[in-house]
Amino acid sequence: MKKILWLFTLALGIAIDLNAQADVEKKIQTDLILAEDGDVVNLDGGVFTITKSLSLDGKKNIVVRGKGIDKTILTFKDQTSGAEGIRVSNCENIVLEDMTVQDSKGDLIKTMHVKGITFRRIKAEWTGKPDEKNGGYALYPVQCENVMIDSCIAIGASDAGIYVGQSKYIVVKNCTAYNNVAGIEIENSLYADVYNNLATGNTGGILVFDLPGLIQKQGGYVSVHNNIIKENNLSNFAPKGNIVAKVPKGTGVMLLAANHVEVFNNEIINNSTMGVGIISYYITENKIKDKQYNPYPSAISVHDNTFERKKRKVPMEGRFAQIYHFKLKFGRNVPHIVYDGIINPKYRDAAGNVKPEYMICIQNNKNQSFANIDADNEFKNISRDVAPFNCTLAPIVLNNKQ
């Protein structure tokens, strides 16, 4: 009889808890729907199971605030509908702060068409081991303007932990990204300042990419400085077909078809394949169907960084590793900075020299080592001479509206 009563009490307790969780979920979504411009939506402390995407649409000047980064936890592990955990769209001046969001089916927090979006003291994570079934992006502003990501933590994304795409006027600062394929990624975006972050334990630490086939065709004016980018040696777990699936294990910084990028005053430490890679889209071996796309990197400045790397061969994983082992034959003497050497012929003057506005400049890096791998000529004339790249570009000065 006591056992029956215990089971009844347990079942009743579970039912009451489930009802309470459902009430919390309903209240949060109702508060987001009914919020008037200028309101603060306060979330209680506790761990709350959310089964459907939470959405905020068409609002202005709204703050959604938890009780603290580890005090308000929204878990989507039992999510039954919706592509994201939280979705914010068609809004202006939105602040999300002081909470943790976990284990959504797709992206954890996605914001789209938002003018003025701040993520502050947000932890966005998949709590299990790195897995290709994890959502692609933890923090995911796309086609936004005036983006601030400050003091956030991103963990476990199968694409990028902190991703800003097709946006402009961006600051990513004081954040930590680990156990992602890409820790921090700036893609087809303009005027981005990325600083005082820690990117560690990812496949690639910080990526600046321009890709074809997107609405915003070309990014640029990206400053990556004063970051710690170390030991990004995680095996790539991105789903096949994703562009980041081509990022080699052991990448510190990768600049793919990027233009007007300055990388300086970073600590780039013990990334097993490359400290900084400057590469064109052609080396991905993907076909380009976008006629407006520019696949060449240009106006890149890499200076005053500190490099460290243990003497060892690169990991034998992926296409880049095959190139390193069988084409470049670096052995244990792997350079910190790698440039694929593929240049747009239009970037050269009549004498064959690269015009100043398109130059790749590398100088004043501690423990600097370099290779131009001459990918355009089947790696026939690999050069470790950095002298042709000893030049200076004007600093990138950003006046982001933050």
Image (cartoon, rainbow, N blue to C red):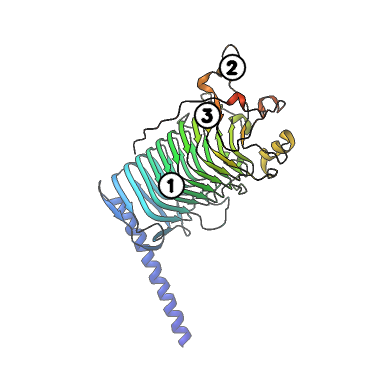
**Residue furthest out toward the top:** 350
Question: Which SS class for mark 2?
Answer: loop
Q: Which residue is mark 1?
A: 174
Name of the residue lying farthest toward the bottom: 1
Q: Secondary structure at mark 3?
A: strand
For marks 1 and 2 on the same chain, the one whose residue lies earlier in the sequence: 1
CB contact under 8 Å: marks 1 and 2: no
Residues under numbered marks 3 and 1 in contact, where contact means CB atoms less than 8 Å apart: no
Give SS at disc 1: loop
Q: What is the CA distance from the residue labelled 1 to the residue labelled 2?
A: 40 Å
Q: Position of residue 399 (x, y in %)?
A: 36, 33
Label 2: few (<14), some or many (≥20) within 10 Å? few
Q: Which numbered disc flags the more N-terminal residue, 2 or 3? A: 3
Label pair 2/3, CB-CB below 8 angstroms = no
Q: Position of residue 178 (x, y in %)?
A: 53, 50
**Label 1 sits on what residue type?**
Asn
Residue 54's spot in the image, x, y percent? 38, 52
Label 3, on which residue? 300
Give the amino acid at mark 3. Ile
Determine whether, in the image, residue 40 is placed left or right of residue 172: left
**Within 10 angstroms of label 1, few (less than 14), some, or many (20 or more) residues?**
some
Q: Nearer the viewer, residue 209 or 315?
A: 315
- Numbered mark located on residue 315 in the image: none
Task: Determine which of the numbered discs, if any, sits on residue 353 in the image.
Answer: 2
* Relative side of 166 to 352, left or right: left
Three-letter amino acid code of the residue under disc 2: Asn
Q: Residues within 10 Å of mark 3 (few under 14, many from 20)?
A: many
